[in-house]
Image (cartoon, grey):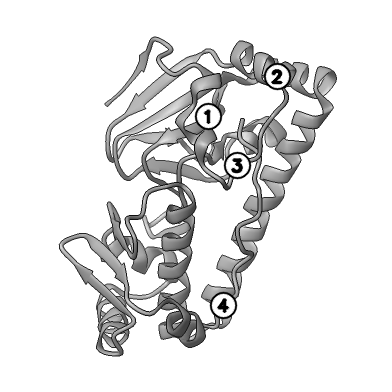
Amino acid sequence: MSAAVPRQTPCRKCPLKTLEIFRAVSPTELNFIEEFKSGEFVTDPGATILMEGTSNPHLYTVLSGWAFRYKTLEDGRRQILNFVFPGDFLGLQNSTFNEMQHSVEALSQMVLCVFPRDKLWDLYSKHPALAYDLTCLASRSERLLDEQLLTIGRRTAIEKMGCVLLDIFIRARHAGLATGSKLKLPITQQHLADALGLSLVHTNKTLNKLMAQRVVRWKSSTLEILDEPKLAQISGYEGAGPILRPLI
């Protein structure tokens, strides 16, 4: 179930603004973002936020919660493209192609900041710096998909597992979700299998191999990174580092 709620979080008091990963906007841009935002939307776990092949009149910034982007084949097989964290922007593809080319499903309860898509041109025409920020967000999404394609196509199973666990952990840490080396996950091994193109059995065996090497621990829906440098070495994970990101 999903429901619209009255605006509860003024943009100037957004809790994400305190995170070091997001760069500041000017007072004028902040005023525009507050006018652009039409409200907030609350979703339950399992809710479809955006659906492949449909058009949605809204754009969203994730204020809290987890989700994943995915595509499906006619027989129901699913490929998870990447995972979604607070601060991520959803629906821009809909503005370019008039319909979504992938779906987005909530993994946990989420709060989404809602922006009307038909007012997007005001952003481009009146605030070119914010328009550039949208280009940066689109480029970042492209980079994440490039890395996912490399992982699925060329990395070994243990490299795949190491890369996806590190990517999830590091992105979650930037979003303020991790506590030290631990991260509470709404993600199951089936989600990992669908992200990596592995069977559930192979996913479980590969995860156990990493745990046997004492680089990660997965217990009671909690991921713990025991040796981050060694996990990065095993998986060949390079990452992009903590680059400042726009927040709209």
Give the residue number, with chain letter if any, for mark 2. Answer: 27
Please tell me whether mark 1 or mark 3 is closer to you in this view. 3
- Relative horizontal placement of residue 157, taking residue 30 as reference (left or right): left
The reply to whether discs 4 and 2 touch (Cβ–Cβ < 8 Å) is no
The reply to whether discs 3 and 4 touch (Cβ–Cβ < 8 Å) is no
**Position of residue 37 measured from the top left corner of the image (x, y, whole percent):** 56, 16
Q: Which mark is residue 127?
A: none
Q: Residue at 60%, 58% (x, y): give it.
A: 242
Please tell me whether mark 3 or mark 4 is closer to you in this view. 3
The reply to whether discs 1 and 3 touch (Cβ–Cβ < 8 Å) is no
Instruction: Please say if 190 is above or below 121.
Output: below
Instruction: Please say if 109 is above or below 102.
Output: above
Element at badge 3? loop
Q: Residue at 55%, 36% (x, y): give it.
A: 90
The reply to whether discs 1 and 2 touch (Cβ–Cβ < 8 Å) is no
- Image quadrant where one finds the N terminus: top left
**Position of residue 12 measured from the top left corner of the image (x, y, whole percent):** 55, 20
Three-letter code for the amino acid on which mark 3 is drawn: Phe
Give the residue number, with chain letter if any, for mark 4. Answer: 153
- Relative horizontal placement of residue 244, taking residue 197 as reference (left or right): right
Element at badge 1? strand
Element at badge 2? helix
Give the residue number, with chain letter if any, for mark 1. Answer: 60
How many angstroms separate mark 3 from mark 4 (CA)? 31 Å
How many angstroms separate mark 4 from mark 2 (CA)? 44 Å
Front-lying residue, 56 or 138: 138
Element at badge 4? helix
- Quadrant in the picture for residue 56: top right
